[in-house]
Image: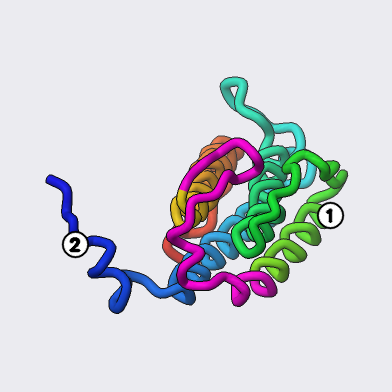
């Protein structure tokens, strides 16, 4: 059953605010950062199970979505996701991760409330409403972080508690 009053209901009283959404995303990013930190250097770049990519590659995918993604969400200008080489060290990945976190904080205030409902073509190929693209960025991170948890467990390590964001 379709609710025809959804649009009107969210104008004055959104379920979450823009600040709630960015805090939720940044909470996930803080947790994923701790997962990156938890990996031994060699295993971050080499360890794999069942043909899945090493966690360094998964972390880079998250970075390559978030960095141009926040710019696209804020400005409508969507750059290529693949223009970044993978750093050779965990510290290099963490440094890049932190720069993207700062970029999210810098661009987020530029997003108007109306922008979240607009339809745009993310990265020139994924047409969706802006809020749905942001949900995808977050969902993708959660999915890949889960792979990191599996890797850490397989390495005999305890991953950070998922609820501590």
Q: Secondary structure at mark 2?
A: loop
Vertical position of residue 51 compared to residue 11: above or below: above
Q: Tell me residue 56's x, y (percent).
A: 72, 42
Rendered location of residue 121, percent (x, y) = 57, 44
Q: Start and end of the magenta stretch?
A: 105-128
In percent of width and height, residue 29 lies at: 59, 61
Judge left or right: residue 148 versus residue 128: right
From what the image shows, is residue 19 above or below residue 147?
below
Label 2 Cα crowd, 10 Å radius (few <14 / some 14-19 / many 20+)? few
Residue displayed at 65% across by 48% down: 65
Where does label 2 land, which residue? 5
Instruction: From the viewer's side, name the closer residue of 112 and 104.
Output: 112
Magenta stretch encompasses residue 119 = yes
The quarter of the rendered structure image containing the N terminus is top left
Residue at horizontal 52%, vertical 60%? Answer: 28
Q: How many labels, in total?
A: 2
């Amino acid at each position: 059953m379709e609710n025809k009053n959804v649009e009107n209901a969210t104008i004055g009283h959104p379920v979450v605010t823009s600040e709630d959404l960015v805090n939720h995303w940044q909470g996930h990013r803080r947790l994923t950062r701790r997962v990156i930190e938890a990996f031994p250097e060699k295993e971050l770049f080499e360890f794999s199970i069942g043909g899945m990519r090493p966690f360094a590659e998964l972390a880079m995918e998250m970075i390559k979505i978030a960095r141009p993604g926040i710019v696209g969400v804020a400005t409508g200008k969507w750059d290529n996701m693949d223009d970044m080489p993978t750093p050779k060290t965990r510290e290099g990945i963490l440094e890049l991760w932190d720069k993207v976190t700062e970029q999210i904080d810098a661009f987020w205030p530029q997003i108007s409330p109306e922008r979240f409902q607009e339809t745009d073509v993310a990265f020139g190929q994924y047409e969706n409403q802006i809020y749905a693209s942001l949900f995808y960025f977050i969902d993708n991170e959660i999915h890949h972080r889960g792979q990191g948890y599996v890797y850490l467990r397989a390495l005999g390590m305890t991953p950070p508690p998922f609820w501590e964001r």
